[in-house]
Image (cartoon, coloured by chain):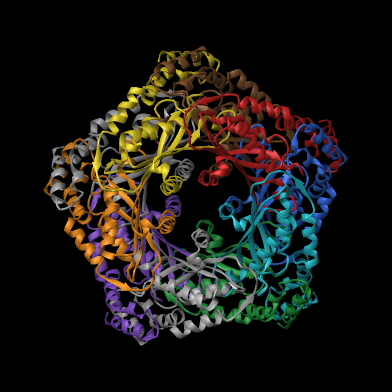
Chain colours: A orange, B yellow, C red, D cyan, E blue, F brown, G green, J purple
Amino acid sequence: MDVFEDIEGLLLERYSDWGGKEQFKGTSTRLKKMLGEMYWTTSQIDEEIDKALGASFEESYNQMLVEGPVSVWTLCPHHLLPCHLEVQIGYIPNGRVLGLSKFSRVAVALGRRPTMQEQYSRELADTLWERLSPDGLGVYVVGSHGCMVSRGVLQKDVRVSTSTLKGSFLDDPGVREEFFSIARK
Amino acid sequence: MDVFEDIEGLLLERYSDWGGKEQFKGTSTRLKKMLGEMYWTTSQIDEEIDKALGASFEESYNQMLVEGPVSVWTLCPHHLLPCHLEVQIGYIPNGRVLGLSKFSRVAVALGRRPTMQEQYSRELADTLWERLSPDGLGVYVVGSHGCMVSRGVLQKDVRVSTSTLKGSFLDDPGVREEFFSIARK
Amino acid sequence: MDVFEDIEGLLLERYSDWGGKEQFKGTSTRLKKMLGEMYWTTSQIDEEIDKALGASFEESYNQMLVEGPVSVWTLCPHHLLPCHLEVQIGYIPNGRVLGLSKFSRVAVALGRRPTMQEQYSRELADTLWERLSPDGLGVYVVGSHGCMVSRGVLQKDVRVSTSTLKGSFLDDPGVREEFFSIARK
Amino acid sequence: MDVFEDIEGLLLERYSDWGGKEQFKGTSTRLKKMLGEMYWTTSQIDEEIDKALGASFEESYNQMLVEGPVSVWTLCPHHLLPCHLEVQIGYIPNGRVLGLSKFSRVAVALGRRPTMQEQYSRELADTLWERLSPDGLGVYVVGSHGCMVSRGVLQKDVRVSTSTLKGSFLDDPGVREEFFSIARK
Amino acid sequence: MDVFEDIEGLLLERYSDWGGKEQFKGTSTRLKKMLGEMYWTTSQIDEEIDKALGASFEESYNQMLVEGPVSVWTLCPHHLLPCHLEVQIGYIPNGRVLGLSKFSRVAVALGRRPTMQEQYSRELADTLWERLSPDGLGVYVVGSHGCMVSRGVLQKDVRVSTSTLKGSFLDDPGVREEFFSIARK
Amino acid sequence: MDVFEDIEGLLLERYSDWGGKEQFKGTSTRLKKMLGEMYWTTSQIDEEIDKALGASFEESYNQMLVEGPVSVWTLCPHHLLPCHLEVQIGYIPNGRVLGLSKFSRVAVALGRRPTMQEQYSRELADTLWERLSPDGLGVYVVGSHGCMVSRGVLQKDVRVSTSTLKGSFLDDPGVREEFFSIARK
Amino acid sequence: MDVFEDIEGLLLERYSDWGGKEQFKGTSTRLKKMLGEMYWTTSQIDEEIDKALGASFEESYNQMLVEGPVSVWTLCPHHLLPCHLEVQIGYIPNGRVLGLSKFSRVAVALGRRPTMQEQYSRELADTLWERLSPDGLGVYVVGSHGCMVSRGVLQKDVRVSTSTLKGSFLDDPGVREEFFSIARK
Amino acid sequence: MDVFEDIEGLLLERYSDWGGKEQFKGTSTRLKKMLGEMYWTTSQIDEEIDKALGASFEESYNQMLVEGPVSVWTLCPHHLLPCHLEVQIGYIPNGRVLGLSKFSRVAVALGRRPTMQEQYSRELADTLWERLSPDGLGVYVVGSHGCMVSRGVLQKDVRVSTSTLKGSFLDDPGVREEFFSIARK
Amino acid sequence: MDVFEDIEGLLLERYSDWGGKEQFKGTSTRLKKMLGEMYWTTSQIDEEIDKALGASFEESYNQMLVEGPVSVWTLCPHHLLPCHLEVQIGYIPNGRVLGLSKFSRVAVALGRRPTMQEQYSRELADTLWERLSPDGLGVYVVGSHGCMVSRGVLQKDVRVSTSTLKGSFLDDPGVREEFFSIARK
Amino acid sequence: MDVFEDIEGLLLERYSDWGGKEQFKGTSTRLKKMLGEMYWTTSQIDEEIDKALGASFEESYNQMLVEGPVSVWTLCPHHLLPCHLEVQIGYIPNGRVLGLSKFSRVAVALGRRPTMQEQYSRELADTLWERLSPDGLGVYVVGSHGCMVSRGVLQKDVRVSTSTLKGSFLDDPGVREEFFSIARK
């Protein structure tokens, strides 16, 4: 990520006529370190998901479980502005249950690259569906997007909601309604 | 808009017997400039909508997306008093998705001429329906109307809600309910 | 309303042994004037309704519009204690729409005589139904009644809700539910 | 209720070694008077209900009316600890309506003896059903029970909800849902 | 109060052309009974105050006690419209304390005649000061006035606050501040 | 106010290429009538103030009274956009008190011409000070300005607060603090 | 406490004409057991306080500590109706600190006999002052009294606040203000 | 539970270089005592359930009763971190009702061993179903898990909801919806 | 700002193994345009301030005016993460007042370069002080910092408050307290 | 920390008669790992503080900065139950400022060993005072203690507040009040 090396110089030059320019010393190094921590390669994300979904517990509980809101930070891919997503995940297990903190870890990991909310919702549902093979699965995401809050359109209170349903969550109207009435609460 | 030229003189004359009349100097110029910025001709509105709806992104996400409340200011056409609309827009895409800030831009642009809330709701839904050709579309608008708040009837807390549904949002009761349960939240 | 002439004397006599009795001077006059302004004859009420419902606008908007809460003061006919009604009005227009402030004016006018909430709800729905001939119409009223708040039973938080539905609002369960989910919000 | 005569002596004796014991002088008298006012015999309760339900008004209003929350204090029969009930009453009249404060009086009167919430809900519904012969009737009660708040289990926020439905409120799912959506608001 | 005898006839005549006029039958009787219960003569008020302030308890507690908000209904003397007062009472006892429900009874009794809030505040403080002879005393009243809410000026949220301080509450800035910081909370 | 005659034509011409233009028919007439009702000449304002302040009541109450928030609509003189002011008025009377609704009427009347909030606050305090000659007087105003909410800067939650103090409200720190702690609550 | 033996018979006799009378079987036993658990003799209370205040920890922290609201149930000595007290305790230690749960235990124990709030506040402060010998101590109590909520005066929202200050909390205005600003929050 | 004996020494050793180490003296004893009180053996739990469910009352009430939220503390079995569960219990009795505090006691008892929320929900429903043989039964649990709040994933607001339904609660959609609409409120 | 040209390629390469990489097409162009709009050179900022502060109005209002919260977005200079500042500005004018929207424009303009909150507060106060020469001036800023919310320390609710006072705001304790009591409200 | 090795066996043995015992497999390993991450040795804590306080920025801002609430988890040293602290930190810098996230890191690090809130407050203030040498410093901590919430005393809403002031925060009443009015907000 050599491109960030130049940002410090660029800022120092641009604001050479301003008293606050000293603060930019070391910004490139800090920025590079922070981005390395916050944004991962595809293989780093896959590895985290593998670790999180590795273990499960035998348990005959067979009704719906909903967990959330999981707080996830990502970047919108179009302007690289931060987005905050509140994620709700529901599933009906079939014989084995996942440790509760694992859902959060997968939800956080999939936000560690710049991604649209639509794609994020779809990928989170696909990932859990393939790995857990549950009876049914639902993902409901409410996002606040930097691109609408701080930029041009200045729409401070706008929220965007998306969802992806699988199995009995998609097919059975009763299950669907039960999931949404908890997740949207 | 020559008619505004005279407002300054009119106010100065009307309040010639009052100490605050000095503030009106320059009011015509300021008013004219402001109205030019805030209220557009039909072709200016169309141009903004064209720009906003010009680009979309390929994405297989195919469940409902709801965005709002978008904050829109317009004028009621009967008394030219300001109305504030909170707009919720939902759609089910079919292969391509719109950048999230575009919905806000269209909703704001259509308020840039004096319009009744009923007509506004219908026009916003028609515009998005024609341009996006989605599987389904819904618009839900809650308005606070200057004509009821500051004038005669003095009904301070009155809100007016209108909606326009298209495609699966109109025909499928489950989709309809899902849209309203998010939009009215 | 000559009966009110005597109230001043009555109060002055009753409280002749109290330092605050001076305040009653002029009470009869003030009371009479206020009652004349606040409580109207049937023909005054009809006239106001005629004026409010005289004009409408052509508009093809054909989905539901809900307006409220309109704040209405009336008197309960049994003890003449003030009641406060919060009124929600919904309709589905068929070709013409009413100016938004007109609904409020009709709702206020019908409260300008002592009336029970049940009768008020019914009369408001009947009046709008006959004059507007809409596709469907609904009225939902939530009242706080002086007779329960300040008198004997001392039930401070009690609210009373009544409603009257007409046309598609009465017959179509989906329309009915849509109206109530907005009106009761 | 002679048994209360001894309470004063009992307390004075028990706390003879404490500086605050003077406060108990007169407690028996006060307690006896208070209990006489707050807790009635069955015939006192019946008499109050007769008075409250004696008069009604002709009125063609024929949709649902819901009144509440009526605040009722009773004692649980097992530990004689105070319970607070919030009562919602709904009915669909058939030709005659009851004065609004009457519902509150009946609801309060039936709490004037130690009673379980389950029995109270049933008795209130039975009483109104027999006397009013309405089209339908519903009672919904939410109770806070002293036996759970101040005693052993110390469950401070626990609420108990019970209901009793009659006629169209029991048989017609739409009516049932309409009642609960208002009563539980 | 014979003047109220005619009100029923007056209303029946005035609304002879309206379907709801039946409700007025018996209104005079009900109104007269209600006014007798709610509004008392000066001697009835004095008697209630005498009963309430008759007994006190020896107790060496000598710091501030504040009680409220006591809910009081009165009528404004100018238009006879209902006013609701929330009353806070504070005092520093000197050797004897009053039963807590007594303050409420005095506050309610003094509202049982039509009175201005200014006078009410002054009378309540004077009454308690003379009878209790405490170290200091304060009364703080926040009123909602029917004459501003339902009539001409239609100022829905207006509140009026008045206060009367005596002894150390008036003279000692620390005591004054302590009283107001609790009473205004 | 002949200048408003042309507005209707101007709008019809400007939006001749748009389906909603019909709504503008009659706008000039409605606008002119509304402005005549809402915005008054200096002499109309003075007349209303004279009527409101004409009568007062003898009363020995001599501590602080605070009334508000009075809701006032005015126009900013620079862009003629609506401003909403919440006004708190406090005074310490000296022998005579004003009817409570009078303060509201004066506060509303002074907003019936386009005025800056700074000037409005000063004029309201000056007017009451001269007419009432109280011991002390304070005015506290919190405004929401259309010019910041709907226009360029789009600062949705900005509020502006101003105040004007006279007599003991200005000179005595204790009085000043008491006024502000109530008014800013 | 033999007096409670008769209550069961008394209730069964009193309500012999009512279907709910079965519930009273065993009430005497339950009541007696509950009262034994909830209300203690003076020596039981003293013993609990001794245990709670037996141990402390050396710690040089020497600024203010405030703990609360501790939830305490007691009975008013005049009508034996339940009172709920929210207790705030503050102190400035001098070399040793008390385990945090001990304050709560003492506050609860002193409510385990029927006591007036004034006396309770004084006793709690005296007890902690004597045992802890701190630099300063403050107790602030806000009570809800059954005798005002469920009985005659029916003042549902009334709260009573009392306080007792010792040492620097009483003498130093800055310390006093710091305590109250936390305790009243 | 001898293993806890060593914890005190372990902490003293680990923090031998820190001024706060004195506080650990006695920690083993306190910890052991606390764990004995808070966490029970299977037979202790069974015994408590037996006692709680031993007695019931004859009562013909036959509609739904819902009680909650019961506050339950347990430990997650994977990290032994505290979890807080808010439990709602509903049932439709068939001839006999349980004392209201008994539900709370069973719900608390089943949390007195380290357990997953899924298993807890299932066990609570199974226990009540077997013992009460009601018409229908439902359990709804919302948990806050220490393992997500204070540890690695740091998801502060995450809640987990689970439920177990039996009999008519599982089979009848109307009953199911009624239970959830109360329990999730 | 050529450095941003490479970001698109960098992202496409980094996520070449991921299905969402298409979204990055055009990101460099969009990012560059957005940064040009949101972040200005020192001379662009100075120019905007000059325009905003160019005109003022003569007005004798001479007490405090406070405006806010103005919503300002900036970047922290150390990690270039977005910070949101809520700014309150107060001043006491001396003969001339500034149009209300001007304060907002200056506050927004000074955030259009990466800056620490401490420096921002100081610069905003210095700028207004020099240009307006008021009697006194105060700036109070409450910031939410991306570097604490989305990064390492994950402190979701942390707010940072800073202030800068000048003239009578710094020297006069009464003025200072008045400013803060409004600004911190 | 070998003592934790035995916990798994202990739990498996204790609950050998229960179906949920499988969940304990691996608990020792997970517990040990978690404790290593969450609770540090004195030298680990010192090292983190050294890193956090290593760098500062030159800046002439010289008024108060307050940061918080920082969310900190620790264990009470007496029962090893989790405590949650909300920490507010204020200082007046003298020439150099600390990066904002550093305060949070120090506050979190000092909670990474079992500690009493009193000691924690003192240590946090001492640490920052020695390292930053500011003009003044204040720490204000509000704690929720597991030992009062989930254990014996069951005091669900109790909060404990402590503070430590240094330099001008301790000596200057104006500074002290300014700090507390922000920190306690």
Find residue D143 and report its horizontal and vertical position in percent: 61, 63
Question: Which quarter of the rendered picture does the N terminus of chain G lie within?
Answer: bottom right
Q: Is residue B134 left or right of residue D161?
A: left
Find residue B68 and report its horizontal and vertical position in percent: 39, 42
Find residue D36 and report its horizontal and vertical position in percent: 78, 67
Q: Quadrant of residue C43?
A: top right
Q: Quadrant of residue G24?
A: bottom right
Disc count in the image? Answer: 0
Extreme right residue here?
Answer: E2
Q: Quadrant of residue E62?
A: bottom right
Q: Say whether residue F74 is visible.
A: yes
**Residue at image x 75%, y 65%?**
D38
Q: Is residue D47 left or right of residue F183?
A: right
Q: Nearer the viewer, residue A107 or B9?
A: A107
**Residue at image x 30%, y 75%?**
J31
Q: Say whether residue E78 is visible.
A: no
Q: Nearer the viewer, residue G79 or A121?
A: A121
Extreme left residue here?
Answer: A2
